Image (spheres, grey):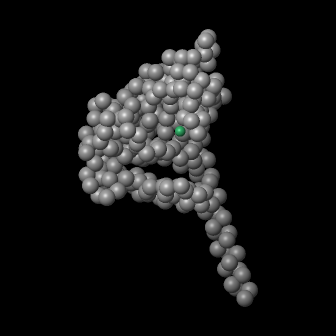
Amino acid sequence: MAGRTFLGTVRLALLLAVLVFVALGAWLDRRRSTDWDDTLRVTVYPARADAAGAATPCAANVDASDFDDAASFLAREAAAQGVALEEPVRFRVSQAAREPPPALAANPGPFSVALWSLRLRYWAWRVAANDPLANPDVQVFAVYQAGDGRHAAPDSTGLQKGLIAVAHLFCGNDAVAGNAVVVTHELLHTLGATDKYDRSTGQPLAPEGLGDPGLSPLYPQATGEIMAGRIAMAAHTAVIPDSLDQMTVGPGTAREIGWLR
Ligand SMILES: [Zn+2]
């Protein structure tokens, strides 16, 4: 009996040690990725097939230039917030993800979200291990679908503690600018940024979700805050931006991602 108790204690201690290591590792990764001493390296992995195994229409045509808008937006906004780094974020595209990442169940409870996030981390770690290119700081898994961008894609997700994001994007040259908005929003989630819109209506929160909170009259806004995702036309209406040219990084988001201290 005593041996069994001893083994049980050892098992519990090991489990606790693993949990502490995972938590500490996540904390260190996150700290390192938001110190802005050096360029943050982001790899976008287009899924080459959908969940049913059918080839994704455009994954093979995606290249790093599709994210030039996102890189220059982040450089411009970081400079505006006083970050002295010429290239704060660099995007690369890897074809190392054959299938889309594990999907989250519909209407998930807290337990299934936790389980899904562990599965996603393990899956992401395996993709990076099979990638001949160097491991990035942040992994963005991009699931592309054909379409004109006006039909809603499933919600994209940025894991705050795993430096992993899943972005649902559209194929085609017309969609590149809109895709850059989605990828940038999800990337900033992985760095600790929170949403700045009303979850029930999608309306940007005022003032933190507005591109220009000092505008008088307040509406219509000409720009939107990247974590609000939309541009507020009035207190209860908002439009989806065409490109990152219409977006900003507000002081709230800048503080969350370590640009402002
Ligand atoms: Zn969001």
Residue with the most extreme front position: 236
x%, y% of residue 71? 42, 29
Quadrant (top left, top right, bottom left, bottom right) of the N terminus: bottom right
* Residue 195 visible in this rendered orientation of the protein: no
The correct choice, above or below, for 235 with respect to 144 in the image is: above
User: In the image, what residue occupies the spot 51% across and 44% down?
Assistant: 158
User: In the image, what residue occupies the spot 49% across and 39% down?
Assistant: 186
Using the rendered view, name the quadrant where residue 214 is placed.
top right
User: In the image, what residue occupies the spot 61% across and 57% down?
Assistant: 110
The correct choice, above or below, for 178 with respect to 216 in the image is: below
The correct choice, above or below, for 110 with respect to 82 in the image is: below
In this figure, what is the number of numbered marks? 0
* Residue 25 visible in this rendered orientation of the protein: yes
Which residue is more in the foreground, 70 or 111?
A: 111
Which residue is more in the foreground, 199 or 184?
A: 199
User: In the image, what residue occupies the spot 58% across and 39% down?
Assistant: 200
x%, y% of residue 165? 47, 45
Which residue is more in the foreground, 127 or 210?
A: 210
Does residue 181 appear left or right of residue 192 in this picture?
left
x%, y% of residue 215? 60, 13
Residue with the most extreme right position: 2
Residue with the most extreme bottom position: 1
Does residue 199 appear left or right of residue 181 in this picture?
right
Using the rendered view, name the quadrant where residue 114 is placed.
bottom right
Which residue is more in the foreground, 198 or 61?
A: 198
x%, y% of residue 196? 59, 33
